[in-house]
Image (cartoon, rainbow, N blue to C red):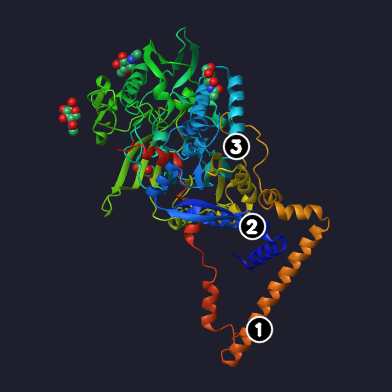
Amino acid sequence: MSLTRLVLFAAAAWADDSGQCNTVELDFVVLEGEASHRAIEDDIRAALLEVGVTARARFLEKEEFNAAMVSGDYDLVFSETWGAPYDPHSYVASWTTPDEAHYSVLETHEPPLDPTTFASWVANVSSEVDPVERQETWTEILSAIHAAVLHLPLWGKRIPSVVGRRLEGYVSGPQQFDYPIASIRVAEGIKNVTIAPGAQTGLFQSVGRLDPHSYRPNEFFSNNWIYEGLVKYGPSGNIEASLATAWTTDIRDDGGETFRFTLREGVAFHDGSAFNCTAVELNFDHVFASPLRGPDWHGWYGLPGSLADWYCDGNDFVLETTEPYYPLLQELTYIRPMRILSPAAFVHGIYTSPETHNSCPASWGNVTGDDGSELTCVGTTAPLGTGPFRFVSRTVDDDDDDDVVLDREVVFASNPEYWGGEPDIEFVRVLYFETHAEVKEALLSGELDAVIGAGVLEPSDIQDLQYSEDFDVLHSEPTQNTVIIMNIDDIDIRKVVVHAVNKGPIIERELGGIEQPVSQLFPESAPYCDVDLVPKFDYDLEKALLLNCPDSQTTKKKNTKSKTATVYGILFAAAAVLAVVLVVAVCYMVRKERAGEPLFMPLTNPLIEDEVQLAPVKDPEAKDVGSTNSVEIEIFDGRDVNK
Ligand SMILES: *[C@@H]1O[C@H](CO)[C@@H](O)[C@H](O)[C@H]1NC(C)=O
Ligand SMILES: *[C@@H]1O[C@H](CO)[C@@H](O)[C@H](O)[C@H]1NC(C)=O
Ligand SMILES: *[C@@H]1O[C@H](CO)[C@@H](O)[C@H](O)[C@H]1NC(C)=O
Ligand SMILES: *[C@@H]1O[C@H](CO)[C@@H](O)[C@H](O)[C@H]1NC(C)=O
């Protein structure tokens, strides 16, 4: 706490007589090692203290943290929405399963926010066929969540990119790990480009198995370069053509919905074989075989459970659902587990059996469902897709003690047959760096052409590079919001928290100013979320005081002179504190002088210079947002999909 802040705080306490605030104590659970959360938890606690709310931070290791979240053993906890392309439906649908932090919050609410009614509400909007009605229902759901004040929205995460000036035309992707480098034109120099990409852990370590049908250690960004889906997620969640060029939807007589996809003609896989409906069907047969569709595997999202059937009709691919399910198209844009792999990369080619030789990773072993269904995972044989880049080679370094496989370098080549046009870049080399500082050094020395993604450079470095003539610094639209979930019974206290925290200065101070304050749960760029929710969850100290320190406020209201009185009070308190500081300082100096150790020595004294240099040292971790990677991932990990 700075001296100014101390003085202000003392003055506020003196003027307000915070004895008049209600005593509120909150349990603030923070994940140990989560650098950006760690950096701001004390700012939030200080802000709350000013309105009489004492929040005590409880730092927990991952396992204990998850246990506390799941059991509702917290008053305040950091969370993130799942971001594009998952918001809003996948994230809110997850609230109604008992292994999510919101479940215990909803349990204390009346309908429609209790878990059962809320689940039915979300299921209803997901099967709403009319887009206008659908938006209306989403507006109602988002308004109800907002009115219940379940969250303190903090900031929207924007994905930064720092791109050297010899590369032109890069535009940030609409989802966190979508790095569309195929659009880059190389304006000068060789067409080989080096990149340090933002990975799920921040700094890149490995591209993993590079198979499109499973999860970590695969990285989204590299799988997204190699593999494509039928459709793709565009700006604001618009569904765009990809391997399908067009589609129609029909409600059948039995109440289900039929999606019919026209497939792109003339597309080849990286092995040269033709892309056609047989390949799409083979991929669906493997990924959505029972029991892989179940909750322990791919059932964390709605699509697998909604499917009734799929087949080829000529070269059209047809999907049938048991009932209308509008998120199906949005979910087909997900980077995993359903992107199209070449039949040549299944162990027995196009005839590979989903039961005896499923494409799921061999490490998953034999998979058995509750219904007795069983299959054997054998993995895939090569990373062959239809995307703009194909895998060439990797330089693996696995002599580390702790079993961590590192890819020192991974090389991708442009796909000359790409249906979207051959990329201008010829080869992409993805490089491993141990520290943020090494990345910065390589960028400044010209070894690296671009840093694309979050958690690779320090936020303060990104900020500095904005003024460099050698680089373009870009930020995506906010892709997901960081929020604090409040598991507090009294809605007035929740409102106090929402209005006590001034986000802008905290972001400026602790996050290098690169994120943007938000006042509602979802980014407005998420589908159905461009809704103006009131009242705004913004900093409003007067409102917070009115709610938690009503006595001090009523006194003030009655006394028209109170504002002036407060100002005088603050000035007086400041003067008093300064006077005390001065007196103490003078006494100290006098004593030192008398003891023969005068404080003011010539500036050449090396001791003093050392001290001067030591003073501004900051905790380098405090600015590391590299580890803020998506909570979504952790949730999937928790569900065993990583075996
Ligand atoms: C969902 O739809 C069903 C059937 O129309 C209806 O009975 C139920 O009340 C709806 N749920 C909510 C929360 O609106
Ligand atoms: C570009 O990279 C490829 C693959 O690593 C390499 O074979 C080629 O020599 C490089 N070209 C130049 C001009 O450095
Ligand atoms: C798709 O291509 C494969 C291999 O080239 C071929 O065996 C198959 O018959 C084709 N399917 C369709 C529907 O044309
Ligand atoms: C997996 O299932 C196959 C086929 O039923 C069987 O041959 C194999 O022994 C099983 N493997 C394990 C590890 O249980």
The answer for how far apart the CA atoms under marks 1 and 2 are is 31 Å
Residue designated by label 1: 586
The answer for how far apart the CA atoms under marks 3 and 1 are is 54 Å
Q: Quadrant of residue 293?
A: top left
Residue type for callout 3? Ala
Residue designated by label 3: 148
Sort mark 3 into few (<14), some (14-19) or many (20+) by Cα contacts within 10 Å: few
- Tell me, yes or no, if residue 430 can be seen here: yes
Tell which residue pokes out farthest to the right in this image: 560
Q: Quadrant of residue 522?
A: top right
Q: In terms of sequence position, does the residue under pointer 3 or pointer 1 come before the other? A: 3
The answer for how far apart the CA atoms under marks 2 and 3 are is 24 Å
Q: Is residue 320 left or right of residue 533?
A: left
Identify which residue, 193 or 149, lies in the foreground. 149
Above/below status of 331 relative to 39? above
Residue type for callout 2? Glu
Ligand 3 positioned in quadrant: top left
Q: Secondary structure at mark 2?
A: loop
Q: Secondary structure at mark 1?
A: helix
Residue designated by label 2: 50
Quarter of the image with the N terminus is bottom right
Q: Where residue 259 is drawn, which disc sits there?
A: none
